Each structure stands twice: as C-alpha cells, then as structure tokens.
C-alpha cells in the first residue's frame, strides 16, 4: 500500500508542476529570507524566478522561487512539498526538465 501511495503522490506532483502555478495555494516552509517563512496565500502571478503571493490579509508579496521549500496545493487534490529548484523557470522550461531528468519525488 505504501508504495502505491508514493507512486500516486509522485504522479500528482509531476502533474502539478506541469501546469501554471497561478491559482494554487502555497505555504513557504523554508526560505533563505527568514521573514518569508510560514507565509500562506494564493499565487497570483508567476515569473521565471519568482512568484507573487496574495496573503490572506490581501497583501501581495514577491518571493524568489529558487531559495525556498514550498507546500503547493489545489482545491481538488492533495498538497505537495516542492523545492524551489523544481518550480524555477517558465512553464515550458519545467516541462522540458520533467521530460528530461524526471523530477525527484
């Protein structure tokens, strides 16, 4: 059972990374900038190097992708922990990376 669950989570993670991040719920677990830790909100904009998160109070904050550890989730599926390296780059670059080197689950 554990192996099937792990495989299912891996497939879901790849599907999540294969789409735009806009609209996903996010929580920053770790970041090089300590003031960004434990911020929760919704991703409202995505660039190659950063995401803009609207916090629950309505404030928008820019966060660099590369230096963080994030929990991403949507309304329809489970939450997934991803490294900033996995979401770094444009959607097209992420798709190429997933196809080439297989994202680590």
Image (spheres, rainbow, N blue to C red):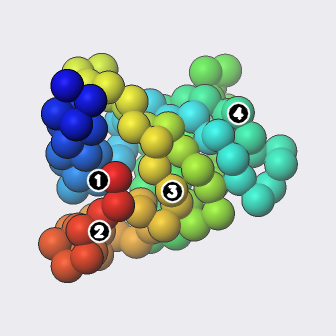
The image position of residue 77, as x and y in percent, is: 26, 25
Alpha carbon distance from label 2 to label 1: 7 Å
Look at the picture and state if 41 lies above or below 95.
above
Residues 90 and 54: in front is 90
Depth check: 75 or 6 in front? Answer: 6
Q: Nearer the viewer, mark 3 or mark 1?
A: 3
Query: How far, Cα to Cα, is label 1 from label 4?
Result: 21 Å
**Upstream in the sequence, badge 2 or badge 3?**
3
Going from N to C along the chain, the mark reached first, 3 or 4, is 4
Residue under circle 4? 38
How far apart in space, not on screen, are marks 2 and 3 (Cα)?
Answer: 13 Å
Name the residue beneath numbered marker 3: 83
**Front disc: 3 or 4:** 3
* Residue 34 picture location, percent across and down: 83, 48
Dot 1 falls on a residue whose secondary structure is helix
C-beta proximity under 8 Å, tags 2 and 1:
yes
> Left or right: where does residue 60 sit relative to residue 79?
right
- The residue closer to the viewer here, 102 or 91, is 102
The residue carrying mark 1 is 17
Please name the residue that numbered disc 2 is placed on. 94
């Amino acid at each position: 059972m554990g192996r099937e669950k792990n495989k299912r989570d891996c497939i879901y993670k790849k599907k999540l990374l294969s789409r735009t991040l806009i609209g996903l719920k996010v929580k920053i677990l770790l970041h090089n900038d300590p003031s960004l830790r434990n911020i929760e909100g919704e991703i409202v904009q995505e660039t190659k190097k950063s995401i803009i998160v609207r916090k629950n109070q309505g404030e928008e904050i820019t966060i660099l992708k590369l230096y963080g550890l994030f929990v991403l989730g949507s309304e329809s599926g489970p939450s997934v922990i991803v490294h900033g390296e996995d979401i770094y780059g444009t959607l097209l670059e992420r798709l190429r990376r997933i196809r080439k080197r297989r994202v680590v689950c």
